[in-house]
Image (spheres, helix red, strand yellow):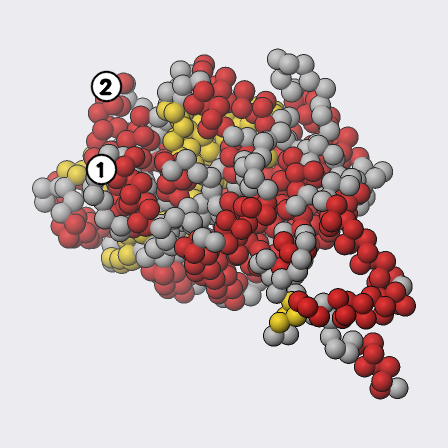
């Protein structure tokens, strides 16, 4: 099971994020841009809506025969000369990879952006046995140098300014006086990482899709680091959640047509790499050993669980960009590996519902995430279910339980509701300024610290309605 | 079945001994246990795959051969949209001169290339005459000192020349299958990549790529095929620093495609 990344409560993390002006501006610019690009990409692609339905149907059907598809995948990878490992927990996945690293005498491991290896906290484990993990996606490289965590699934360093990156590179790479110019900084990263690619013994990647019928592991990147990692080191280890398997190449074509459009608004990402086991006879390059780690870590229990649909997720990040909560607080405030609306569900899947007792409420249930999701995952429905479970287990804070209980009773009894409205109208009087309630006493004050509350109307709707007849 | 009950703690704990590893059988058994609870709740039929994909592909190729000019026009516009540089020459004999021009503009002196039989055109003699060294990639893996020499040479090369197995019009994508003589790095490590192709590589859509991939994997793979298929859609790019689009982060900064009207010498 993965650990919480930060120990502070959600409220503190959110407050901190809300106070960060650069973060705010960066989030606003980035998410607005991603939304526009995505809309444009699907606007130019009339068959997109039908393909989204097909993609969802493929995910749904694949889970119904997951055992058979995984067996086919394993058989094909072994036929191609690869090795497959089965990890029930994050700890087991780490041990499998550490064993491979030890056996092959690896000293440097180059990594291509993989949420699965973030999820199992692989880097710390590698360092502990003397293997240096090097993140090679530019954004991941930046935050690794800064000892931070990704704040967006596809733009992990979205929260950093170019000035901060220049300062970071100058200090950490011993290249004083670098200009705050993305072109210059990218070139520096290219030089530094090129050396690492050539030196590394071990290449570690995630998996975007695994095609069962052909034993193919598919990696999608824009920078080309996925290709480097699977071309130069002697050993390649790919880590995938079991839900990444799809049956056929025909299915792959469907997913490729919607993934990049949803993520960055590109018709296709720059590089889609289909890896079929280790290098073949006659090939000059490519790993001599290929390992695939199949990861459960809470996924299998959700095949028949309340969070089943979150197993359809492609990790495109579209739901983050449209989420009014994510857009305000960014990825770090969520406090776990996976941020945003889908991140709350994945966190609950990996760590149990207790881990999201606050996060389950970090959503306005507006439904924008479900609209944006390429496979139409009904995220709000599952968030409501999570809230119900959090409530059932009495792990919600008590003031919240009292408020919701009271409100539920008011809604169920019209007479009480009318009474409540009249009472509220009287009690609110000292707090209404310019037609808004801007601060409340006691623990209610926490709610109004960053929000205004609309007051109870001078005449409620019910009262006006009665006046009409 | 309690379908709506969330597993309390990140999944049912598997029976685990401290040092023992989960076996394939245990792993699949747990999956089957969960699957049994959802039987009949969702359709389980996968999407239809083409029966006899090779025959279907032959048919498609015949259809495509009748409308290749439109396909090429669309490829060109999409390829340019993703910052690819498109060139067109009348015949294979014109390819070396076009390459020479590209090299001169960039002061590129060290080329690595697929061998002539994989490119469908011999480029080394003409470029050599022009003072540009071309290293052809070997079709058999050489012994170690030579391999190390090649690795260093690839790392230093200014330009890589490859063929293309597919050119996808819908997305402006080049598809390259690795093999003996067609190393993965030729299109990746040098700062400039040039792919040479003709009308036989053209397909219209990603859906058609799906069919091609089905056909390529129908039956045993040809002995010489490598382990990687790369889709390349423009030059390497990133927007990880303040969303500023920057090219050439790990892969090439430039990607060129040379279309040969008269065809390459690959297909008889």
Q: Image check: B99 left or right of A139?
A: left
Count every numbered label the image shows and give the total: 2
Mark 1, secondary structure of its residue:
loop
Image position, residue B4 (x, y; %): 79, 43
Neighbourhood count class around disc 2 (C-alpha, 10 Å): few under 14, some 14–19, many 20 upward: few
Image position, residue B193 (x, y; %): 28, 46
Residue at the spot 69% in from the left edge and 21% down from the top edge: B25
Toward the bottom, the furthest residue is A468
Residue at the spot 13% in from the left edge and 47% down from the top edge: B107
- Nearer-the-camera pick, A1 or B109: A1
Q: Quadrant of the N terminus of chain B?
A: top right
Residue picked out by circle 1 = A175
Q: Chain of mark 1?
A: A
User: Which label sits on residue A69?
Assistant: none
Q: CA distance from mark 1 to mark 2?
A: 34 Å
Q: Chain of mark 2?
A: B
Instruction: Answer with the quarter of the image where residue B2 lies.
Output: top right
Residue at the spot 67% in from the left edge and 14% down from the top edge: B17
Q: Image check: A208 left or right of B41?
A: left
- Nearer-the-camera pick, B80 or A26: A26
Residue picked out by circle 2 = B145
Q: Image check: A308 left or right of B59?
A: right
Image position, residue A362 (x, y; %): 63, 51
Instruction: Answer with the quarter of the image where residue A91 lies.
Output: top right
Residue at the spot 66% in from the left edge and 70% down from the top edge: A432
Neighbourhood count class around disc 1 (C-alpha, 10 Å): few under 14, some 14–19, many 20 upward: few
Image position, residue A75 (x, y; %): 60, 27
The correct choice, above or below, for A9 with respect to A423 in the image is: above
- Nearer-the-camera pick, A90 or B225: A90
Mark 2, secondary structure of its residue:
helix
The nearer-to-camera label among 1 and 2 is 1
- Is residue A306 visible to us here? no
């Amino acid at each position: 099971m993965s650990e919480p990344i930060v120990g502070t409560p959600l409220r503190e993390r959110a407050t901190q994020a809300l106070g960060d002006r650069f973060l705010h501006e960066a989030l606003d610019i980035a998410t607005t841009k991603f939304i526009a690009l995505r809309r444009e990409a699907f606007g130019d692609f009339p068959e997109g809506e039908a393909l989204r339905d097909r993609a969802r149907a493929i995910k749904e059907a694949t889970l119904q025969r997951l055992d058979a598809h995984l067996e086919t995948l394993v058989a094909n990878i072994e036929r191609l000369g690869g090795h497959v490992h089965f990890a029930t927990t994050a700890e087991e996945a780490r041990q499998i990879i550490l064993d491979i690293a030890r056996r092959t005498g690896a000293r440097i491991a180059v990594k291509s952006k993989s949420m699965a290896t973030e999820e199992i906290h692989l880097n710390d484990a590698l360092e502990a046995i003397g293997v240096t993990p090097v993140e090679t996606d530019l954004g991941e490289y930046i935050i690794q140098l800064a000892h931070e965590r990704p704040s967006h699934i596809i733009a992990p360093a979205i929260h950093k300014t170019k000035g901060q990156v220049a300062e970071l590179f100058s200090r950490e790479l011993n290249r004083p006086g670098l200009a705050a110019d993305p072109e210059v900084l990218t070139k520096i990263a290219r030089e530094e990482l090129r050396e690492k690619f050539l030196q590394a013994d071990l290449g570690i990647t995630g998996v975007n899709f695994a095609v069962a019928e052909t034993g193919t592991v598919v990696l999608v990147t824009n920078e080309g680091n996925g290709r480097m990692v699977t071309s130069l080191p002697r050993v390649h280890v790919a880590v995938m959640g079991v839900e990444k398997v799809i049956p056929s190449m025909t299915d792959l074509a469907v997913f490729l047509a919607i993934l990049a459009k949803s993520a960055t608004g590109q018709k296709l990402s720059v590089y889609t790499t289909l890896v079929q086991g280790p290098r073949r006879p006659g090939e000059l390059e490519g790993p001599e050993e290929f390992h695939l780690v199949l990861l459960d870590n809470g996924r299998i229990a959700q095949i028949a669980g309340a969070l089943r649909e979150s197993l359809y997720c492609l990790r495109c990040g579209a739901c983050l960009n449209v989420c009014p909560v994510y857009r305000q607080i960014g990825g770090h405030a969520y406090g776990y590996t996976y941020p945003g609306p889908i991140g709350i569900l994945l966190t609950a899947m990996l760590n149990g519902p207790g881990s999201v007792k606050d996060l389950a409420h970090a959503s306005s249930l507006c439904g924008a995430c479900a609209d944006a999701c390429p496979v139409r995952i009904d995220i709000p429905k599952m968030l409501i279910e999570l809230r119900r479970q959090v409530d059932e287990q009495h792990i919600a804070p008590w003031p919240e339980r009292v408020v919701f209980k009271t409100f539920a009773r008011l809604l169920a009894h019209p007479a009480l509701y009318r009474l409540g409205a009249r009472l509220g109208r009287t009690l609110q009087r000292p707090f209404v300024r310019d037609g808004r309630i801007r601060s409340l006493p006691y623990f209610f004050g926490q709610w109004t610290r960053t929000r205004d509350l609309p007051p109870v109307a001078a005449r409620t709707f019910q009262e006006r309605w009665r006046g009409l007849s | 079945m309690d379908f709506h009950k969330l597993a309390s703690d990140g999944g049912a704990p598997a029976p685990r001994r401290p040092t023992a590893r989960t076996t394939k059988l245990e792993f699949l058994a747990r999956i089957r246990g969960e699957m049994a609870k959802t039987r009949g709740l969702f359709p389980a039929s996968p999407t239809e795959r083409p029966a006899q994909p090779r025959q279907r592909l032959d048919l498609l190729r015949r259809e495509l051969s009748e409308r290749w000019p439109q396909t090429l026009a669309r490829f060109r516009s999409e390829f340019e949209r993703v910052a690819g540089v498109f060139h067109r020459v009348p015949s294979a004999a014109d390819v070396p001169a076009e390459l020479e021009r590209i090299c001169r503009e960039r002061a590129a002196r060290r080329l690595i290339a697929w061998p002539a039989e994989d490119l469908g055109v011999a480029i080394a003699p003409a470029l050599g005459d022009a003072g540009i060294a071309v290293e052809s990639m070997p079709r058999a893996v050489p012994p170690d000192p030579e391999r190390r020499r090649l690795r260093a040479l690839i790392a230093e090369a200014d330009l890589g020349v490859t063929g293309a197995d597919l050119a996808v019009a819908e997305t402006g994508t080049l598809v390259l299958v690795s093999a003996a003589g067609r190393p993965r790095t030729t299109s990746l490590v040098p700062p400039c990549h040039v792919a040479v192709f003709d009308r036989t590589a053209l397909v219209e859509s990603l859906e058609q790529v799906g069919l091609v991939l089905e056909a390529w994997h129908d039956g045993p793979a040809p002995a010489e095929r490598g382990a990687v298929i790369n889709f390349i859609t423009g030059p390497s790019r990133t927007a990880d620093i303040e969303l500023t689009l920057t090219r050439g982060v790990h892969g090439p900064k430039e990607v060129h495609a040379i279309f040969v009207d008269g065809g390459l010498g690959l297909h008889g």
